[in-house]
């Protein structure tokens, strides 16, 4: 197995293990966690935007693709994630009246997170095919946004009626789909390499959507001046990590 694929597997295994981050929340005071989660969200925003605009999109432009095609693919990525999220909201509200032990939102989280992890695995695997630094940058961005997401997913599963042990296990199984994503990249091989520069702008659009539509609104829920400054610094640090990684390319 070539070096890029080895790096890709190691990366997705690390990302998958982040699904067990809920274990640490068992030992944290709920109020303390709520006060500090915005720092992780801020880091995720900076890393996602930094990876999209500093790494992925520039690589796409250097590939020789038409700027118009790249722009359309970025928009397509944004719209795709918007449609998926909209569909999940419709599906959720359509089942709200059901009186079952486990709330439907728990199943929706598992399904949507599983699809997201599969895409993450494909993106990570495809990124390593370009270069190891680009793969590392993408992996770091995924890690930074996975931490607050996995904590949130764990909380939703508990709210939905799952036991803590089952919630952790389901979260982990969902995260393992990122390994499937890398396997898909390996199976497609040269075909993946041919279409990689079409996939990455699409993924960049997804990163931009997640950061702007899902995470930034969460930051706006904190209005205190002190915490707002911390948020800005966290976002800036996330972007700075992406700038730092480009130095080793």
Image: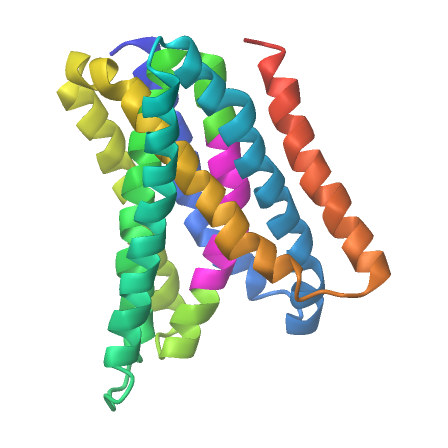
By what rule are the colours in the image chosen? rainbow
Q: Nearer the viewer, residue 44 or 72?
A: 72
Please give left or right for residue 174 compared with residue 46 in the image.
left
State the image quarter where residue 248 is shown. Answer: top right
Q: From the top left corner, tell me how far across and down residue 212 is, in percent.
A: 53, 49
**On-image quarter of the C terminus:** top right
Q: Judge whether residue 12 can be spotted in this image.
A: no
Most extreme residue toward the front, as rendered? Answer: 68
**Camera-nearest residue between 211 and 72:** 72
**Main SS, magenta residues:** helix
Magenta residue span: 139-153
Residue at the image point whose x is 14% and y is 22% from the top: 187
Q: Is residue 35 left or right of residue 207?
A: right
Q: Is residue 238 found left or right of 135 in the rendered image?
A: right
Horizontal and vertical percent position of residue 158? 42, 73
Residue 111, above or below 142: below
Q: Residue at x 42, y 33 (%)?
A: 204
Q: Nearer the viewer, residue 100 or 1?
A: 100
Residue 99: horizontal and vertical position, in percent?
25, 91
In the rendered image, residue 77, in percent from the top left (x then y), is placed at 34, 39
Is 24 contained in the magenta span? no
Whether the magenta-drawn stretch holds residue 151 is answered as yes
Residue 34 in the figure: left or right of residue 170: right
């Amino acid at each position: 197995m070539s070096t890029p694929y080895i790096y890709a597997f190691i990366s997705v295994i690390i990302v998958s293990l982040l699904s067990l981050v809920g274990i640490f929340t068992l030992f944290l005071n709920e109020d303390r966690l709520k006060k500090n989660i915005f720092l992780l969200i801020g880091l995720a925003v900076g890393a996602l935007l930094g990876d999209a605009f500093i790494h992925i999109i520039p690589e796409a432009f250097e590939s020789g693709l038409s700027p118009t095609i790249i722009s359309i693919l970025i928009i397509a990525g944004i719209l795709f994630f918007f449609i998926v999220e909209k569909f999940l909201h419709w599906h959720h509200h359509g089942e709200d009246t059901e009186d079952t032990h486990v709330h439907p939102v728990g199943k929706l989280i598992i399904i949507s997170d599983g699809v997201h992890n599969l895409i993450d695995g494909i993106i990570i695997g495809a990124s390593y095919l370009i270069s190891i630094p680009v793969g590392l940058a993408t992996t770091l961005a995924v890690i930074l946004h996975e931490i607050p997401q996995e904590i949130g997913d764990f909380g939703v599963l508990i709210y939905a009626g799952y036991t803590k042990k089952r919630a952790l296990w389901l979260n982990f199984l969902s995260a393992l789909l990122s390994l499937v994503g890398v396997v898909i990249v390996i199976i497609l091989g040269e075909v993946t390499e041919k279409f990689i520069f079409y996939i990455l702008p699409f993924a960049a659009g997804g990163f931009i959507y997640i950061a702007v539509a899902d995470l930034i609104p969460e930051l706006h829920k904190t209005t205190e001046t002190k915490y707002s400054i911390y948020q800005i610094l966290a976002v800036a640090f996330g972007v700075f990590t992406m700038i730092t990684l480009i130095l080793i390319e």
